[in-house]
Amino acid sequence: KSQIFTTDSVMSYHAPHKSTSSCRQGYYRYDKEWTLCAGSLEDVFQTDTSLQIFDVSGRMRMMYLPRRLLQGLIPDALLDQYRMYQSADDNDSSDDCSNITGEPLSKTDGTRIQVNLSKCPFAEVFRTHVTMDGAEVTWSLMNLMDATSTAVDLVQQFTRLENLSHILVWCTTEEDGEEVAKVELPRLRLSFTARSERLYCDQHAGYYLNTSSVDSSTATLLEQFGGGTVLLEKENGELAVVASKIAEPLRPSTAALPVDKALSWVDR
């Protein structure tokens, strides 16, 4: 499968670069807000002859999967970091939802991923890395399209900075469910590690993601960035604003804002 169009480039695992335009939405996460559509419904791939590439260096013969075959099923951030292969034996079976292996493009990246498409339309993704003491640790990728409270809260926070296609939330498996271990925003070179029920920023020592309400003066300060910010805080109450160069400020819903606030947004 390959995604060729989305009505909301921010809330999609893949945002085609062609034919970006604005449209108005009214589904459950929004109150008729303006969003950016991306792609074209005319970009349908025609069946034709193709070239198959195999990796025979290991014990199994693996067939290379072009990234366009997985666009929309897993976040684009993973397709930017890994080269995908499918077992040649899986390719010959009648089960299209087979396991896929991702090898890192960077020689300094010691991780690998497994993608399971048995629960289409969304994939299960697992990443394995080696710790400093030599132990292998496997994390699972949270499906941010899920309507669970944890996923919704994280989406509301991090889509201020980045599109869903480039937000990776890795989890450990506990007895009572998944626990967030790390949040990565590769294009922004920003990451957060879960510690003491907070998400601490790896690039700014001592700062954690502020998820509580703020006073009116701080809220006014944040408004000038057009929504593309998150607030970091230290234990001593010191605050820092992270502003994204990637997030595109969108016109807010006039139904959700008083007229004077909607007009002031246009002025800014």
Image: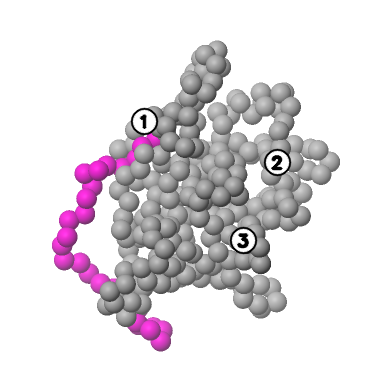
Label 2 to label 3, Cα distance in Å?
22 Å
Mark with earlier residue (1, 3): 1
The residue beneath circle 1 is 23
The C terminus - image quarter = top right
Helix, strand or loop under label 1? strand
Pointer 2 or 3: first along the chain: 3
Residue 194 lies, with reference to residue 219, above or below; the image says below
* Predominant secondary structure, magenta span: loop
Quarter of the image with the N terminus in it? bottom left
Instruction: Report the residue marked by disc 3.
Output: 178
Q: Nearer the viewer, residue 60 or 198?
A: 198
Amino acid at the residue labelled 3: Glu
Task: Measuring from the top left, give residue 145's x and y in whole percent.
Answer: 48, 50
Helix or strand or loop: what does disc 3 sit on? strand
The residue segment tinted magenta is: 36-61
In magenta stretch: residue 58: yes
Crowding at dot 3, Cα within 10 Å, few <14 / some 14-19 / many 20+, comes out as some
Q: Nearer the viewer, mark 2 or mark 3?
A: 3
Query: Left or right: where does residue 59 sit relative to residue 177?
Result: left
203 or 267, nearer to the observer: 267
Q: x%, y% of residue 182?
A: 63, 57
Residue drawn 56% across the image and 31% down it: 227
Amino acid type, residue under disc 1 in the picture = Cys
* Residue at image mark 2: 210
- Mark 2 residue type: Asn
